Structures are given as structure tokens and as C-alpha cells.
Image: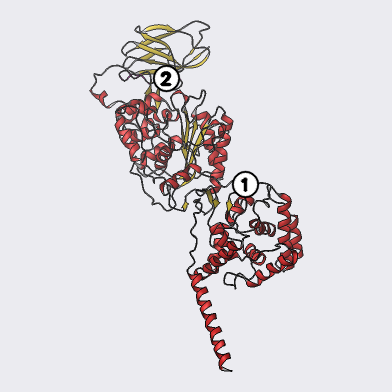
Amino acid sequence: MKPNALIVAVMLLLLAAAGRDAFDDWVKRTELPLTLAEVSTEVRDRNGDLLRVYQVGNGVWRLAPQAGGVDPGFLAMLVRYEDKRFWTHSGVDPLAMLRAVGQAIWNGKPVSGGSTLTMQVARLLEDGPTGRWSGKLRQIRVALALERRFDKQRILTLYLTHAPYGGNLEGIRAATLAWFGKEPRRLTPAEAALLVALPQSPETRRPDRQHLRARDARDRVLARMQQQGVLDASEAKVARRADLPAQMRPFPRLAAHLADRAVRAAPDQPRHDLTVDREVQIKMEALIEKAARRAGGRLSGALIVADHQTGQIIASVGSPGFDGAGGRQGFVDMTRALRSPGSTLKPLIYGLAFDQGLVHPDTLIRDAPVSFGRYTPQNFDGRFRGDIRVREALQLSLNIPVVKLTQELGPARLMAALRRSGANPKLPGGAPGLAVALGGVGISLFDLVQLYGGLAQGGQGRALFADLGAGRAEQQRLISDVAAWQVGNILLGVAPPPGAQAGVLAYKTGTSYGNRDAWAIGYDGRHVIGVWMGRADGTPVPGAFGGRLAAPVLFEAFGRLKPAFDPAPPPPPATLILGAAELPLPLRRFRPRGAVFEEPGDAPQLTFPPNGARLALEDGPLSVKLRGGIAPFTVMADGRPVVAGVRLREFSIPNPGQGFSTLVVVDSKGRSDRVSVQLE
């Protein structure tokens, strides 16, 4: 080589090296756009299935792709259609660019783009223009820089996160959920082809608005995939016949109130895993929606299903119609609202009384008019039943016996037991009074379900929780295992709603003052469910009773939860299972502790009519004769007072009518006697 030629060659090499270094420095100095874009917060169930997803700040649905969560067939189709040399080029494909330029010159207009997937990612990250040369040059520079800093898989993930799919949808997961109602793990060829075509022109190819254009774009992708051997002829033919989605599907919004609580507790956490079972949640939301619609009158409802052995919440429905439709104020989470519990605290009171040795399930307790100062409780039906077993008093949900027990226990003991259960009861006034026993306290459905879960677990259950990663905290002991079993055994005998199976569910209903709240809470050997129904604003609901409104929903909830009830546990070894006549003398009849210091007196006795008598009265009054007791006397026929304030020992009462009747006489000390007669 001549010296001059050698010098020229050296100069050219130096210029090339300098150009290469300058080019490298130009790429190296590229200021990359942010690649850690905000993605939608997700709430998932115990199996990883999506319960709820939240939009990002600008109202966009943008979900982060999951590792291994995108259909391989779609990925293969995407790369072959958009950038077949994606895995080998360094961000820019010169052959594709030359082809695009040549086609534009030949046709006099752009026919195809030369952008690689990496260049498209660069444009998406910066939301830059596509047609101008300055914009294209910027995409090339950013694409080259991206390829130097990230591997191919990371770049592909960025595309799958930011690619537009129409409306406010970004990313493959938002697209498949909105257009097909599923995650992108498994896609048909027709679905995959549509998703390949949409990002090229997401608004003009939206299948819900531009059906023909969307179909043509999809079919072009299918045709090229058949031509390139990605699909065979039969697969492409079937895919072309597939229907396009007619509208966007709503994103999942299950367990909406519970999800909101989880997100508020940890707002910076991108994913929240709950103990909820998605399939059970769907069933329970449908059940509450149906029950509220059936009840009418803008009624709302709430329900919690929990595993009392673990404390995990399986389903939680805060209200029907979370969007507020139907005038039910569905945005209010009624599982946490403070409401009057009605009679639902009675099982706890009886359990405390069992532990204190005040009564046994077969102890006799007197259901008769009684006053505690100015407080005169009444039974729900206005009737009195005289001497009755404690078991029956709880099953019939009588008010007077439970208030008597609360008087002996002290309302403060009941409040302390509620707090040991994890509840946070709120009193309307100052110190608790006897009215607490009948619902004179504010408490939530969540707290009641947790309380009954503790009863189901032998008096010491686990605190309820919904965070799958939370610890399994135990409650403090509420009552003994013996008392808890006795309470559950009694509640198993409560009559079920019409058509429901008896003796399988320990449950209690409740109705608050003014028919504002209807409750039903029950448990079997594994699960506890609580149901509340009423109006979110607390206005009365005439005719709403726990047994009529909430109990059928409770039994249906168990039926939707599982095919059969789990059996109740056996009694603890220390349980005293005896009839009333075999009980120790102090447990045969309930007497207040202070009664032992009272002066002895004879209890009233009905001497006429005698017990078991058959009397022919026709239409005349019934004569009554008494002995013992202290006047004045009250006489009841079949639970209803017929005369009161009587001071005589012989008098007449109105004819109770033909058939069997139970007569009860009560003296001024609350002592009573009863007889059963047949009137003809």
C-alpha cells in the first residue's frame, strides 16, 4: 500500500473510531424516562385470585404483569408480528427501517413502521410523537440506551405494562380483564390476535365502538400468523369466526369495603393478600343483594363468614350495591357500624351465669313481672311464662330471666367480657345499666361474629383477621369450656326458620329497639356467620325481626358455604349433664344471692282450680282460690295478665276460653305458682 493510501486508511479508521466513540457517548448520555411507572394496587384472595383493583392517579387501569402470567402463544404472535428480530437486535432494526422507507417511497406514503418493540417502549414511556423525524430520532436514542441498561425480558415487560388497549386501559392484564374478563395466562388465537392489533391504533380499533375495524385488524394479524406458520389453516379459520367483545367488562370489585380497609392500612403496598375466598365472596354478595332486594324498603344488609378455628375471614359483605344504587347507601361498611345488638348478647350472659354458679341449663327461673327500681323489663311478646327452665328461657329469648341474671352478675362484668372478646362496645351514656342485656350498647357485626367465634371455640377463640400475612392472635378467655358448650348445646335447640334443618346450627337472632336492626349469628363445628339487616341510616323498619328477616339468610349462607354442616364438639369431661330433679339443691331454682337474707315467707299457691282439672264453664268466669303469698297478686292466663293488683284470696277471672290453659299467679315478691287446666 502506498504511503498516501495508508495515511487515508488510517485517517478513515480514526474517524470511524471517533464516530463510534462519539455515538457511544451520545447513547450513554441519554437521559432515560422513568421506567418505574405507577401501577394499580391489587387486592387478592387466599388463592391469589383478583378481588379488587384500583386505578392509578390519572384514572388509568395499569396492572403490573406477573412473572409467567402471559400466554406464550400471545408473546410469540406479538414478536413475530411487531418485531421478529426483537431477541437479536440492539434496539433498532436497520432491515425493518430500510423496508419501511422503501415501501413509503414506492407507495408515496407510509405503509408499515420500522419501529421495534424497544422503540415503541421508548415512545410509550415518554408519550412522544410517532411521525416526525425528531420524534423518531429520540425513540432510536432511548431504545439504544434501554437495550444497554435492561435485558430483553425487562423491555418486553415494559411493553406489556404500558401498551394502550383502548380507553383508559394500559398493559396486557388490564386489556384481558376488560375485554375478556380473565387474566392473560391463557388466550385463544382470536383473543391474542386482537391484543396484538389494538396497540397500533387503540381508539380506532376498539371492538366496542369500531367493530368492523377491530375485526379487520385482528384478521390481518391472523392471516400473517398463518402465512408465517405460527398458526395452521384450521386454527386461523376458527379464530376468524370468533366473536369480538361487545363492551368493556367492569374490573373486579369484590369484598370492596374490606379491600378499602386493607389499602388504607398500608397505602404504599402494591399488593394485598386477604384470607377471603373469592368464590365464597361472590356467593355471599349475591345472597345479600337478593335478600335486600327481597326485603325492599331501601333495606341494606351485611354478612361475615369466618373460620372460628383459625380466625380467618372467608367472606365479608359490607352492604349491597357498593356504588350506592338503590338508595341503600352501599358505600357504608355495615360490618363495622355500631348498632344495637338486640338479644344477641344473651348467650354470653347465660355463659357467664353458668360459670358463676348462678344457674344450670336445667335450673328453673321465674318469668314474671318484675321491677328494678324504675326499670321494668318486658318480654318481646308481652307474655309471662312463670317457672321455666333456663334452657327454654334462652331458646325463647325471654327478656325478664336474662335481666335477672344480669342484675346478679353486674352489667360491668358483661362489658368486661365483651372487651375480652376483642369487641369495642360503646355505651350511649355513662356507666352500663341493666338495659345492656337487651341491646342497650353499640357494637358491630364484626365484633359479634368474633364473640360467637369465641363461644364456638370453647370460650377462647382466635381474633378474626383478613390479612393473609397477619399473626394468629388469640382472644382472652371469655367463659369456661363447659359454659361455652352448654350455651352452644342450648342454641342448637333453637327452632330453625321454616324449611331449614333443625339441630345443626347453634344460632341466635336479635331485634333492636324500634325494629332498626335484625340480626342472626350462628356457628357449627367449623364456621361462624353473622348477618345484619336494616337501614344504614338507622331509621326503623316496621315488621323487621331477626327471626323473620335475618335467620333465613343465615341458614342460606351456610348452605352456599358448604354442602353439609360440621358437627358440634362433644361436651368437656367436667360438664354436669343432669335433669332438674337431679341437680344440687342450690341449682334447682334460681334465687338471687341476697334472697338467703330475706325473711322466709310462703310462696303463693293456687288451690283452685287444681292442676290437671277439667272444668265446664260455658261462658261464665273462672273462680280462683289462693293460699300463701303476699298481696297484691297478678294472675296470668296463657302468659297474658288477666287481673292485677288483687288483694283477695278468692276472686274470679275472665273465662280464658275452651281448651287447655295455663294459669300463673304472681305475688308482690315475684314468687309464683302455676296450674294447667282444661276448660269445656
Disc 1 marks which residue? Answer: 249
Placement of 400 over or under 61, stated as above or below: above
**x and y percentages locating residue 16 in the rendered image:** 55, 80
Q: Nearer the viewer, residue 98 or 61?
A: 98
What count of labels does the image hold?
A: 2
Seen from this angle, which residue lies furthest front? 4
Disc 2 marks which residue? Answer: 384
Q: What colouring style does the render use? A: secondary structure
Mark-to-mark CA distance, 1 and 2: 58 Å
**x and y percentages locating residue 148 in the rendered image:** 51, 71
Magenta span includes 510 = no
At x 32% / y 10%, what residue is drawn?
631
Rendered-image quadrant of the N terminus: bottom right
At x 33% / y 44%, what residue is drawn?
476
Three-letter code, disc 1: Arg
Q: Nearer the viewer, residue 464 or 58?
A: 58
Mark 2, other Cα within 10 Å: few <14 / some 14–19 / many ≥20: many
Three-letter code, disc 2: Phe
Locate residue 88: give its quadrant.
bottom right
At x 63% / y 47%, what residue is drawn?
248
What range of the chain is rendered magenta?
370-384
**x and y percentages locating residue 424 in the rendered image:** 36, 37
Earlier residue among tags 1 and 2: 1
Magenta span includes 379 = yes
Q: Is residue 221 left or right of residue 178?
A: right
Residue 278 marker: none
Magenta part, dominant SS: loop
Q: Is residue 315 left or right of residue 74?
A: left
